[in-house]
Structures are given as structure tokens and as C-alpha cells.
Image (cartoon, rainbow, N blue to C red):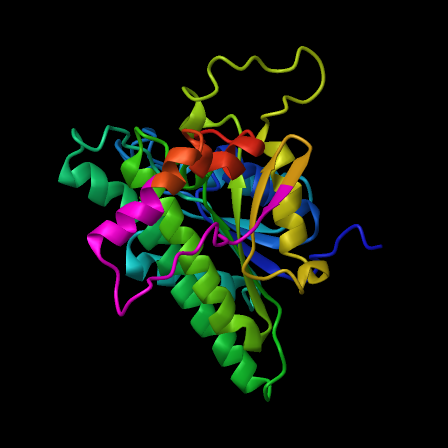
Amino acid sequence: MSSTPLEGLTAVVTGAGRGLGRAEALELARLGAAVVVNDHGQPGRDGTGAASAVPAEDVAAEIRAAGGAALAHTGDVADHQQAAQLVQLAIDRFGRLDVLVNNAGILRDRMVFSMTEDEWDAVIRVHLKGHFNTTRHAAAHWRERYKRGGGQPVHGRIVNTSSEAFLAGSAGQPNYAAAKGGIVGLTTSTAHALAKYGVTANAICPRARTRMTEDVFAGVAPAPDGLDPLAPEHVAPLVGYLASPAAARINGQLLVVHGGMVAIVERPRIAAQFDSKQATFTYDELDTLLTPYYERRPEGETFAAVEVLGLRRG
């Protein structure tokens, strides 16, 4: 088995100046890919502060120092035109784009009754719109390659970043949870749309100790020896695998990943069904059917699947 399964391929990783994105960019480069390291470089995890080229350039330099090929891009992927420029940069400099890893994001946590419109819009813009922008331009590139190649499938891989906040609800993150749920919908739609071209789209829910989750995992001590179970380096190998030819049959999937564990999340299944005995339901009939059903279920059982995995916000 090749130790460089991504040799000759080009990857774009957004939000790659720190944390998960950095670990993913380094892993893709280790597996042989040329990497365009994108990061807007703002110091605040809420997306505030002056943009800086330093985070992206430092990671690109680290890849080059290890013998890989990399360059930095500091644009804002939530800007449609700058996302187009990012994709075009990969094509212009390396001749093609084969892998897109969407990781860029910010946090503006607040309870739903206190959240401002700007806090909602900012998080949706960076996470959900940012994922769409890069996906749209990468998809157009792959479709054009497919046509130019006479209908031969291309190697195209999208790995999107969702979150367990989408699965568990995360009470203090209505904007973040909604964005991450939207990313799953975007991923499955994209998977169906691009499968005929040879392109796959999958989403991961990573659990890792990063700038975004520093308060979530503040009470979880790193391992006294060896690699921290919450280190981003535990997530990166799955991203590298999903980017590879070996993962060609994996499409439209959602996977939870953290220290030494990968869980495949099933699509929602119908738990119960009730049929009306007449043309349409009446209030009384619904009360007779649904009220006892939910009274019999233990409180919180709706999230039983989430609890089995031990999922939490992150």
C-alpha cells in the first residue's frame, strides 16, 4: 500500500492556520498532496481582529520545510469572490484541484433569547456560506474537467466540517448548531449532485482541543503521557483517508471522529407512525395517539442515539 496515496493531487484546506485545519493540511501534505493553506488569520475565535497572513504562511512554510509543496491564501472564504480566487489559485499554481477540506469557522455563543441578529448572521456566513462558496467553485471545476475528459470520472473529494452541536442541540449555540446542521444538508445534496462526476462529499464531526473548543474541554485534562486524546492529530488521518482514492465508495456520509474512534452516523429513522382513521386528523385523535406515546417515553429519550455515543458540544 502506498505511503503517499495523494501523490500528484492538490488540496485546499480552509481555516488551516491553526488547530484542526493545520493538522489536516499537514496530514494531506504528508500523504503526498500539494496543499493550498487558507486562513483569514483573525486572532479572535469570534472572527474579530485584523486579518493576518502569518498563520497560513507559517503552516505553508512548515509543509515546505518537510519537503512538501504548499502555498498560503489569506482570503475570506465567506466572500464568494475570494472563495473563487482560492480555488483558482490551486488550479493556476498546481494545475488542478482534487481535494477540498472546509474547516474555517467562528463562534459567537449566546442563548437564543439573547442572541443578536449580527451574532446569528456572522456565524452562518462563515460556516455555512463559507462551505457553500468553496464547494460551488470546486464543483464547477470538476464538472468542467469531467466534460473535457469525455465523461471520464474525475478524482474530486470534499470533506466538510460539521459538529456534534448539530446532533445534540447545544443550547448556547443556536447559530453554530444551525450552521453545522446546514452543512450536513449541503454535504448530502452535493454528494448526490456530483456523484456522476466521480466526486464524493462527506462531513465529519470532530472532537478536538482547539481555540474553538477551549472552554468546552477546559475540564478535560490532557493525557499525562502520549498524545492527548483530544489532539487534532487524531482527526487528521480520517480526513486524509476520505481524500484518497481508497474512499471512492464513501459518499454523503457523516462521521464522528476523535482520539482513536470513528463512528458512522445513520440517517434519521422513523421511530413510530400513526394513521388517521378518517380523512384527516382531528385534535382529539392526535391527543389520543401522541400524548400517551410521549408520556411513555423517558424524558430525554429523543436524544438516545446521541447519548449512546457520549456526544457533547464541540
User: Which residue appears at 50% of the width and 32% of the height?
Assistant: 19
Tell me residue 130's x, y (percent).
35, 52
Query: In this orientation, which residue lies closer to the viewer: 87 or 63?
Result: 87
Asked if residue 237 lies in the magenta stretch, the reply is no
Residue 288 within the magenta-colored segment of the rendering: yes
**Quadrant of image for the C terminus:** top left
Q: Where is residue 306 in the image (x, y as percent from the top left)?
A: 50, 36
In x, y percent, where is residue 118?
16, 39
Q: Which residue lies furthest to the bottom in this view?
A: 150
Q: Can residue 204 be seen in this view?
A: yes
Residue 89, above or below 21: below
Q: Please tell me which residue lies in front, 106 or 180.
A: 180
Q: Is residue 170 above or below residue 219?
A: below
**Image quarter hosting the N terminus:** bottom right
From the top left corner, tell me how far across and down residue 268 is, in percent: 49, 52
Write the residue at 54% across / 78% down.
145
Magenta stretch, residue numbers: 263-291
In the picture shown, does residue 231 fall above or below 160?
above
Is residue 161 left or right of 110 when viewed as pictured? right
| Residue toward you, 44 or 94 | 44
- Is residue 314 shown left or right of residue 121? right
Query: Can residue 27 be seen in the rendering of this structure?
Result: no
Q: Is residue 107 found left or right of 273 in the rendered image? A: left
**Does residue 244 sit above or below 279 in this rendering?**
above
Between 296 and 91, the one nearer to me in the picture: 296
Query: Residue drawn at (54%, 64%), measured in percent from left and top?
Result: 97
Q: Across the whole image, how many numbered discs are drawn on residues?
A: 0
